[in-house]
Amino acid sequence: MPTVKIEYANGKKIPTAKALPMSLTFKPTDTIADVKKDINRHFPRLPVTRQRLALESKEVLDEDRTVGSLPDNVTLYLKDLGPQISWRTVFIVEYLGPLLIAPLFYHFPQIYGKGTFKHSEMQTLVYGLVMLHYLKREFETVFVHRFSHATMPAFNIIKKSVSGIMQQIRSAHYWFLSGLFLSGSTFGPWYSASKLSGTLRDNAGYLKGLTAVWAFAELSNLICHITLRNLRPAGTRTRAIPYGYGFNWISCPNYTFETLAWCSVLAMTLDPAVAIFLAVSTGQMILWAIKKHKNYKKEFGKDYPKRWVMIPFIL
């Protein structure tokens, strides 16, 4: 049976695994995940989620790679990634921001320093839609989404909260741009019942029509997420070509419907803060969609059908 030697990465000793080097024996059909479990059996302070195994060439090994596919008498280099936090927890924390901040602006108008005022129908409606949107996000995080990587370094969530709005800075996006900026603007006295009386944003038919668009987009987004979930069996990182509702024409229809939902909110409010939030969100989703579309084409080649990336007839 193949023998695998475990060494310290870069020759640096790690406190959670002090008895290296060591040699372990496995079956050819065992995977890197099995190797990590055996390392954890020898070093209980080093859980699987903290381990990174690489070849001498620095190639990091996927957990589903078999031992039999490695060179004979291979040496694997072990690194402790440090304390980890689950991706599920990260997303729950991110989406919690607007759910906590929006009620403060809506239910405590004294925040604006102008006493109390009567909210317009638009403000009441948008408040409900924003809360429902992020409650749906939390529901999907707990019950729908499956993550290719179970954890991330715990330190990263601190960076994500303070470093601004960038590709990997999602907490700031939700807590500050959606929570403080969007809610603080949309629920202010400048959009109160008296200010919007007789305007388009006070028209019941206009608001109901846009609410129907929002509901369609949110439900469609959920259907897309369920489709993606069903592509990946629990506990695996299996990838497959998605088909069905939305996916027959677009690589990332979940982003398409997400954008449509926020476009309806923008049309309801005509608020510059919502426009800025939508622009930042859409720009980020376009970058993600382009990357995913390229990955689909690279992985599946000619088998991947011709599709729009995210925006039909445009991108």
Image (cartoon, rainbow, N blue to C red):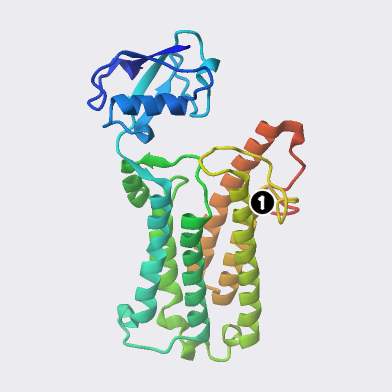
Q: Residue 299 location in percent, x, y?
A: 66, 32
Q: What residue is shown at x 71% (from left), y 56% (from top)?
A: 245
Crowd tier of the residue under label 1, counting other residues whose Cα lies within 10 Å: few below 14, some 14–19, many 20 or above: many
Tell me: 256 left or right of 276. right
Which residue: 56% across, 71% down?
265
Q: Position of residue 133 (x, y in %)?
A: 51, 67
Secondary structure of the residue carrying tag 1 is loop
- Is residue 12 left or right of 59 when viewed as pictured? left
**Do we see residue 310 in this rendering?**
yes
- As rendered, which of 65 and 251 lies closer to the eye? 65
Q: Position of residue 224 (x, y in %)?
A: 63, 55
Quadrant in the rendering for residue 7: top left
Q: Tell which of 51 and 106 is nearer to you.
A: 51
Q: Is residue 294 above or below residue 96?
A: above
Q: Is residue 176 visible?
A: no
**Number of numbered discs visible in the structure rendering:** 1
Q: Nearer the viewer, residue 36 or 132?
A: 36
Q: Residue at x 38, y 35 (%)?
A: 49
Residue with the mark numbered 1: 310
Q: Residue furthest top?
A: 72
Vertical order, 100 against 187 (above or below) = above
Q: Position of residue 302 (x, y in %)?
A: 76, 33
Residue 282, by quadrant, is bottom right
Taking 159 as reference, is 289 left or right? Answer: right
Tell me if 72 is positioned left or right of 210 in this view.
left
Q: Amino acid at mark 1?
A: Met
The image quadrant that residue 246 belongs to is bottom right
